[in-house]
Image (cartoon, rainbow, N blue to C red):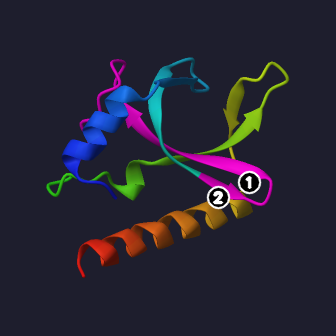
Amino acid sequence: MKDFDDQSEELLEDAVIVMVDEDGNEEYYVEEEIITIGDKRFAVLIPVDADGEYDGFDEDGETGVEDAVIAKIIAGEDGEDSYCDPTDEEFEEVMMIYKERDEEEYDEEND
């Protein structure tokens, strides 16, 4: 994962994605990463406030995997992407890839 300064600057530059939960509450996210599996795309979404600011960095300035949300990206006919829940199998596959990438980044940074 990226350090605090890099991550916070990138999050603020990204477009905020607004999702509405089943109770009608708005939740805000930015895409941290896009993972492609075959012809399917999945977004790793990090929760932010309405201004696009993330305040959930740990003491090392990194985001926690437990805060991330995995969403399947569906390309609309109008060219706009929409997000939906992945299947359990898709979720597991995306998390496995995401964690492997995170471990590889950590290993590279600590070599």
Quick one: quadrant of the N terminus?
bottom left
Q: Residue at x 76, y 36 (%)?
A: 74
Separation of residues labelled 1 and 2 (CA atoms): 6 Å
Highlighted range, magenta: 35-57
Q: Is residue 1 left or right of residue 59?
A: right
Q: Mark 1–mark 2 contact, CB under 8 Å?
A: yes
- Say whether residue 38 is magenta: yes
Q: Secondary structure at mark 1?
A: loop
Q: Residues within 10 Å of mark 1 (few under 14, many from 20)?
A: few
**What residue is pinned by disc 2?**
91
Q: Is residue 89 left or right of residue 63?
A: right
* Nearer the observer, 67 or 96: 96
* Farthest bottom residue in view: 111
Q: Residue at x 32, y 78 (%)?
A: 107
* Nearer the observer, 55 or 35: 35
x, y percentage for residue 16?
Answer: 46, 24
